[in-house]
Image: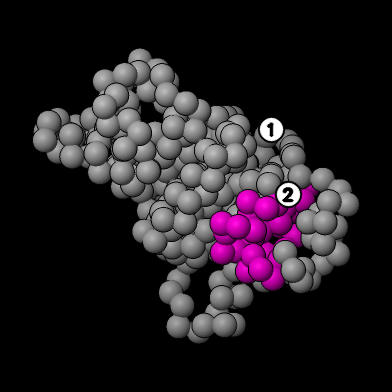
């Protein structure tokens, strides 16, 4: 199953499907001499949600960080290939790459010294945009996309960390969207949130995939089954099985996958 990529699975059902938005080929990731990922070859289809599941320490978050070269920021090294729209990301400037491949982290991280409005447009200002009308339009537009505008429209001048945890996470999503990425990486974005906030994040993911390609790491099996189109199961740094989410959860091809999903280990 390791060599059966998502794209092959899709093509078996629809030979007219477009090429993947991103893909990895024989990707290996290291922390010093420790190999955290082993020969991961995985296609990430356009405008779909790919969930990465697996027990703690299996390489899920490391894989995610490799997709926008943040693994190098935490002292790691990468060998193998990662492509975005057919271009090798290792040949791209990391800052420019992260404008196309944005990331939402497990813990909400709004800039505490900035207002809610300033948080949303911080990336645009870094890119030199100063037009006040454009910035104001961007604030409203992306807070609406993040389903947050109605809740904070009268509090835009308050600090970004003055709102609830669930609102902060949606603010971070708005900030990510404002630089108009092509791919959004989410590292357990709802794990620290209450059920109501979690439901809002999941609803938002459904809306976002109409325009964006999303890769989400989650430890929550129910969440993966609810929001993803495809699921990849990682274990001990290896890609064990990948396929349509319904198939992976109802008819996994490998016993190891079945055991994990059923809670026998992990």
| Residue 70, visible in the rendered structure | no
Q: Is residue 92 left or right of residue 130?
A: right
Count residues near mark 2 (Cα–Cα under 10 Å), then give few for <14, some for 14-19, many for 20+: many
Pick the front one: 109 or 92: 109
Quadrant including the C terminus: top right
**What's the distance in space between the residues labelled 1 and 2, CA to CA?**
23 Å
Of callouts 1 and 2, the N-terminal one: 1
Q: Which residue is mark 2?
A: 54
Q: In the rendered view, would you say 252 is above or below 155?
A: below
Count residues near mark 1 (Cα–Cα under 10 Å), then give few for <14, some for 14-19, many for 20+: few
Question: Marks 1 and 2: CB-CB under 8 Å?
Answer: no
Residue that appears at 24% across and 39% down: 140
**Residue 231 is inside the magenta segment:** yes
Q: Which residues are magenta?
A: 221-248
* Position of residue 228 measured from the top left corner of the image (x, y, whole percent): 57, 59
Residue that appears at 88% across and 52% down: 264
Query: Of helix, strand and loop, which one carries label 1?
Result: loop
Q: Which residue is mark 1?
A: 32
Residue that appears at 18% across and 34% down: 136
Query: Of helix, strand and loop, which one carries label 2?
Result: loop
Q: Is residue 236 left or right of residue 172?
A: right
């Amino acid at each position: 199953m390791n060599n059966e990529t998502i794209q092959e699975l899709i093509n078996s059902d629809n030979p007219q499907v477009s090429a993947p938005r991103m893909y990895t080929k024989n990707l290996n990731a290291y922390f010093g001499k420790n190999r955290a990922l082993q020969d991961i070859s995985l296609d990430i289809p356009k405008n779909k949600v790919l969930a990465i599941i697996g027990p703690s320490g299996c390489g899920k978050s490391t894989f995610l960080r490799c997709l926008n070269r943040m693994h190098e920021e935490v002292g790691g090294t990468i060998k193998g290939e990662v492509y975005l729209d057919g271009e090798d990301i290792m040949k791209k400037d990391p800052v420019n790459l992260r404008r196309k491949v944005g990331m939402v982290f497990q813990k909400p991280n709004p800039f505490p010294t900035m207002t809610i409005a300033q948080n949303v447009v911080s990336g645009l200002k870094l890119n030199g945009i100063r037009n006040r009308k454009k910035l104001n339009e961007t604030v409203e537009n992306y807070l609406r996309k993040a389903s947050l505008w109605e809740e904070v429209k009268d509090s835009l001048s308050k600090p970004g960390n003055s709102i609830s945890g669930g609102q902060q996470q949606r603010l971070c999503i708005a900030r990510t969207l404002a630089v108009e990425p092509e791919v959004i990486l989410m590292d357990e974005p709802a794990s620290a949130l209450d059920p109501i906030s979690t439901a809002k994040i999941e609803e938002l993911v459904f809306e976002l995939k109409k325009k964006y390609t999303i890769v989400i790491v989650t430890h929550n099996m129910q969440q993966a089954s609810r929001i993803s189109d495809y699921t990849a199961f990682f274990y001990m740094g290896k890609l064990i099985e990948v396929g349509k989410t319904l198939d992976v959860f109802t008819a996994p091809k490998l016993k190891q996958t079945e055991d994990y999903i059923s809670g026998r280990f992990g």
